[in-house]
Image (spheres, rainbow, N blue to C red):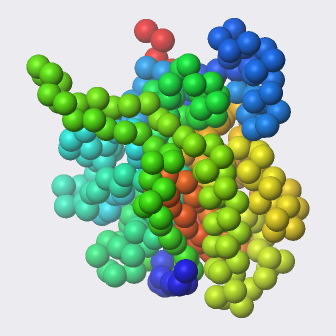
Amino acid sequence: MASRTISGVSVKAITAALPSGTIGEAEFAAIYGEREVARIVRGTGIGSIRTAAGMGTSDLIVAAAAHLMRGWKIAAGEIDGLIVVTQTPDDWSPGCAYAVHDRLGLPTDCFVVDVNAGCAGYVSGLIQAASLVASGACRNVLLCTGDINTRLVDDQDHQVRMLFGDAASATLITAGDETLHFVSGADGSGRSLLGVNLQYEKDGERTGTIRCLKMDGAAVMSFALRRVPEAIDTLLKSQDKGLDDVGLFALHQPNRFILDYIRNRLGVSPERLPVDVDGIGNTNSTSIPLLLSRRHEEDGDARRSVVMCGFGVGLAWGALLADLSKTRVLAPVEVEMDVA
């Protein structure tokens, strides 16, 4: 893995949105049985998840983006780039980004793009947003992530159903004096280990079927336990830094078992490599900015040297080193479910 650098940028603000709905142990136990649910909770650390039943992905994303724009006091007309990372778009075409663009009232000359990426999507999105700014193509890029994972899972597959939750995030990247260092990788031979299959088959007005999310848990875990420490080690060595130079390891949040293993492998404290999955679930590309948003009360010095690392669907992985000490981190906004 080669380390790369993007200079002349600034991560100005980060926030997230969570739906108010939850599904907990009692609800799961009524379906799968108390003993099986207790076993999964012990292994994953996920006792309940957030659910956005009745909402669209764009609803959560717009809530996060509007919350950021109010908090940072940036007008819609100032945003000239929009990147939306999702694997659960509200429609197949034209895609989620255009709905977000419309509902936020962004300018017609705004650069708009959808990115189909999963658990490594936030790091990938940061790289793309920063590249647009560093190149001079855009001044203010709004990077959004969001997924309603609960509508993709098989309700009978409890080992997946109890892991994934719904959330969205928004991040503002502008011109500045900061530098992002990153490594990234992909292994397309593992694409069948985690993902959602699409089968085209014409049947009247229907042209295809979206299958439920499938995961080879053992293979994905083996991938994560191998690639994540390797990516972090490569990134830090490229900058002549060690683990002790990092104030916070903000990793994608799949489950407690994987994160505890990685933390023990690296030899860092729980305070520096936090686990924040209980009550939320695995929120795909949103898990890193959501983790940061839920730690909004921390002093900026704790974010002076942050390693963000995403890993999963693709198979893909990416680690990025950034100084977020000047970044305004806003608490997540909660989005009420429409019960009408």
Above or below for 222 versus 167: below
- To which quarter of the image does residue 234 belong? bottom right
Q: Look at the image and tell me in which quarter the N terminus lies.
A: bottom right
Residue 6 percent coordinates (x, y): 48, 82
Q: Which residue is drawn at 21% across and 41% down?
A: 93
Q: Which residue is drawn at 22% across and 35% down?
A: 200
- To which quarter of the image does residue 272 belong? bottom right
Instruction: Give the camera-side residue of 281 and 109.
Output: 281
Q: Quick check: can you spot residue 145?
A: no
Q: Residue at x 78, y 30 (%)?
A: 41
Q: Quick check: can you spot residue 318?
A: yes
Residue 143 percent coordinates (x, y): 43, 57
Residue 299 percent coordinates (x, y): 78, 62
Number of numbered callouts drawn: 0
In the displayed structure, does residue 261 sit left or right of residue 190?
right
Residue 261 percent coordinates (x, y): 80, 56
In the displayed structure, does residue 288 sit left or right of residue 60?
right
Above or below for 257 versus 157: below
Instruction: Give the camera-side residue of 62 and 166.
Output: 166
In the displayed structure, does residue 183 sit left or right of residue 93?
right
Q: Look at the image and tell me in which quarter the C terminus lies.
A: top left
Given the current orientation, which residue lies at the most extreme bottom position? 240
Instruction: Give the camera-side residue of 207 and 4.
Output: 207
